[in-house]
């Protein structure tokens, strides 16, 4: 336990240092929020066009991707307000990640998306949330673990893909 108490700064600074650090990185966190919102907006727009030519349930894909587009546009616009707090930036980044991931789960279930789509998006969320988002390590870790657990439950209980061996009539 001495090891963890000695290196607890990796997880959380003392409160006064934590607040000073949050104020110091506020400009870069705003830029990170704008970057993640732009990536979401650009990616969802691009995949809306790509999905026109794929064999998917396009009304479901259009509705869910449009929802993520609206969330990212609103958060991008809000990021230019001067009165954003550190907590609101964190909540905005979490909202973007959940909008992306929620869109993937809904389109995989009802839109006929291929199964690899969710795992690719989950990896992208891991990369964006940890490296580009501006979240503290503990917040990014909690968000990533939550998304991973939801994915595991979703893939095992909601949309379980049958293997070739599980299909009836296959020798």
Image (cartoon, helix red, strand yellow):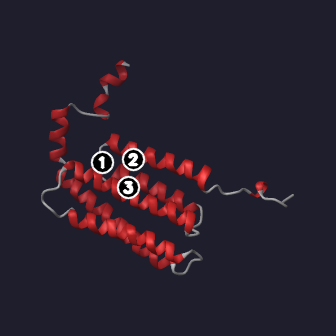
Q: How many marks?
A: 3
Residue drawn at x 38%, y 56% as measured from the top left: 97
Q: Point out residue 125 in the picture as x, y percentages from the top left corner.
A: 42, 55
Label pair 1/2, CB-CB below 8 angstroms = yes
Which structural element holds mark 2? helix
Q: Residue furthest right?
A: 171
**Image quarter (top left, top right, bottom left or bottom right) of the C terminus:** bottom right
Residue at mark 3: 128
Quadrant in which residue 84 is drawn: bottom left
Q: Point out residue 12 in the picture as x, y percentages from the top left corner.
A: 28, 34
**Residue 135 has which mark?**
1
Quadrant in which residue 70 is drawn: bottom left
Q: Residue furthest left?
A: 82
The foreground one among 132 and 92 is 92
Within-10-Å neighbours for mark 1: few <14, some 14–19, many 20+:
many
Within-10-Å neighbours for mark 2: few <14, some 14–19, many 20+:
many
Q: Point out residue 164 in the picture as x, y percentages from the top left corner.
A: 76, 58
Question: Is residue 74 visible in this depiction of the protein?
Answer: yes
The foreground one among 156 and 13 is 156
Residue drawn at x 32%, y 23% as measured from the top left: 5
């Amino acid at each position: 336990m001495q090891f963890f108490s000695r290196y607890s700064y990796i997880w959380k600074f003392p409160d006064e240092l934590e607040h000073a650090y949050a104020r110091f990185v506020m400009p870069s966190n705003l830029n990170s929020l704008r970057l993640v919102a732009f990536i979401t907006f650009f990616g969802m727009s691009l995949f809306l066009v790509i999905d026109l030519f794929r064999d998917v349930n396009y009304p479901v894909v259009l509705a869910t991707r449009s929802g993520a587009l609206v969330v990212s546009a609103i958060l991008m616009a809000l990021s230019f307000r001067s009165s954003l707090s550190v907590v609101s930036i964190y909540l905005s980044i979490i909202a973007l990640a959940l909008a992306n991931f929620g869109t993937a789960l809904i389109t995989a279930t009802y839109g006929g998306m291929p199964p690899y789509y969710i795992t690719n998006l989950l990896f992208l969320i891991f990369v964006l949330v940890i490296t580009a988002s501006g979240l503290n390590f503990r917040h990014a870790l909690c968000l990533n673990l939550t998304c991973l657990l939801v994915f595991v439950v979703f893939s095992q209980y909601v949309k379980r893909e049958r293997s070739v061996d599980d299909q009836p009539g296959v020798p």
